[in-house]
Image (tube, helix red, strand yellow):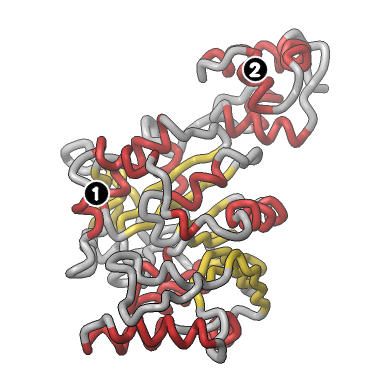
Amino acid sequence: MINKLEVGKRLCVLRKKENYSQAELSEILQVSPQAVSKWETGISLPDIEILLKLSWLLKTSINSILEGDDYIEEVPNVNREHIFLNRILMCPRCRHALKFKINHNGNIVYRCDNNHEYAVVDGVLDFNTREIPGELWSLSLRNYDAYLQGQHSPHNSNYDRGLNQADVIWKVIESKRPRIILDMACGMGIGIKSQIERITWPVTIIMVDISHRILKWNKIFYSTEHKNPFVRMVYLACDGSNLPIMNNAVDLVFSYAGYESMQAKMMDGVREAYRVLKNGGCSVYTKLAIEDFKSENSKTWIRLLLSSLEEEEKDWWKKELIDAHQWIEECKKIGFTENSHTKIYGELPAPKTNKFPFKNEMAQWMAEYVFVSLKP
């Protein structure tokens, strides 16, 4: 029989170890402070859903809470995110499993049996990738203060028209309740940021971007200003078209314009998302598209855009100019069997001039959709 009084004592010790007051813990768990007090004084026990959340928040096992067995980490003094990554990583060069090691300097590295090695630098597992030449956008942020300014600055209002895309995406995330989310080509995490604060179950979010510089600052930001105790953040500086993640490893792939930011590697990124998803998992993402190729508005925008480009840029843009139904057909070719979409907003009205009006963010005139692509 479970000794409720001993369970209560353990909960009290664990709570204090993680620096939660009873009131703070009750708010996170969405229960009354009286409920926490009753657990800790042995009057009652948490139900199974609450126990799962407590084990996550208090960094222990349910068995340790109920029976008092000490929670033993696989490697002493190694953070839980590194133990987690040990189960899902593979070498992007040889596709063999990666396992963490403590090197001679006392630092954590991940190494495969072919001795390919990748180091954790500033809390980010670095696969030595570099941004696309000519698209070194992270260098526009000179330091962390500039990064913070970008996080807190208002967005381009052209992206705020129509439905609230965050709410549309949240309905999908909430219905799936994924335990592992991969944020593809996350950048500063602007899209996932609006979802993190809503999560009320244990989730690991893997932030993937080609820029170590941005991920280093993401780690600071999401562990301080935008922290949710139910969310564990993991950071991989790698190429999204060659993810260092095993097949069938994640529950949901999220992308807020991330696929598009991969440019020529966009479809490779979508294929990688399909590969790493578990069967029954899905990718939920935003995608800009042509609203209607037959409309005069779309025809005008396309003409103005192409006339503003150098010849070498036109071929890429002609492939990017796609409508929602054409995009779904591309997803089916990859293997996604169900592909639904919600229109967030339509195209901007075309200007009555012969000059394309935008120098940056060239696609901001296009219609935007939230797509959900399911892996069978």
Q: Is residue 10 in view from this perspective?
A: no
Q: Quadrant of the N terminus?
A: top right
Q: Is residue 291 above or below residue 294?
A: above
Query: For the point 18% across and 69% down, which residue is it?
Result: 134
Residue that badge 2 annotates: 11
Q: How busy is the neighbourhood of tag 2: few (under 14 within 10 Å), some, or many (20 plus)?
A: many
Which of discs 2 and 1 lies nearer the camera? The answer is 1
Q: Residue furthest front?
A: 352
- Camera-side residue: 335 or 60? 335
Tell me, for residue 187, which label it has, or none. none
264 left or right, relative to 26 = left
How far apart marks 2 and 1 lie (CA) works out to: 39 Å
Query: For the point 54% across and 83% down, which residue is it?
Result: 323
Q: Secondary structure at mark 1?
A: helix
Q: Is residue 20 above or below residue 320?
A: above
Task: Give, as a three-letter code, the residue at label 1.
Answer: Arg
Residue that badge 1 annotates: 213
Q: Is residue 145 in view from this perspective?
A: yes
Q: Is residue 88 above or below residue 275?
A: above
Q: Secondary structure at mark 2?
A: helix
Q: Quadrant of the C terminus?
A: bottom right
Q: Residue furthest top?
A: 41
Q: Quadrant of residue 24?
A: top right
Residue 278 screen position, x and y as percent: 59, 66
Residue 52 screen position, x and y as percent: 68, 35
161 left or right, relative to 63 = left
Task: Give, as a three-letter code, the residue at label 2.
Answer: Leu
Query: For the point 42% across and 75% down, which residue is it?
Result: 351
Query: For the point 33% across and 76% down, which residue is it?
Result: 356
Along the polypeptide, which appears first: circle 2 or circle 1? 2
- Camera-side residue: 140 or 372? 140
111 left or right, relative to 348 = left
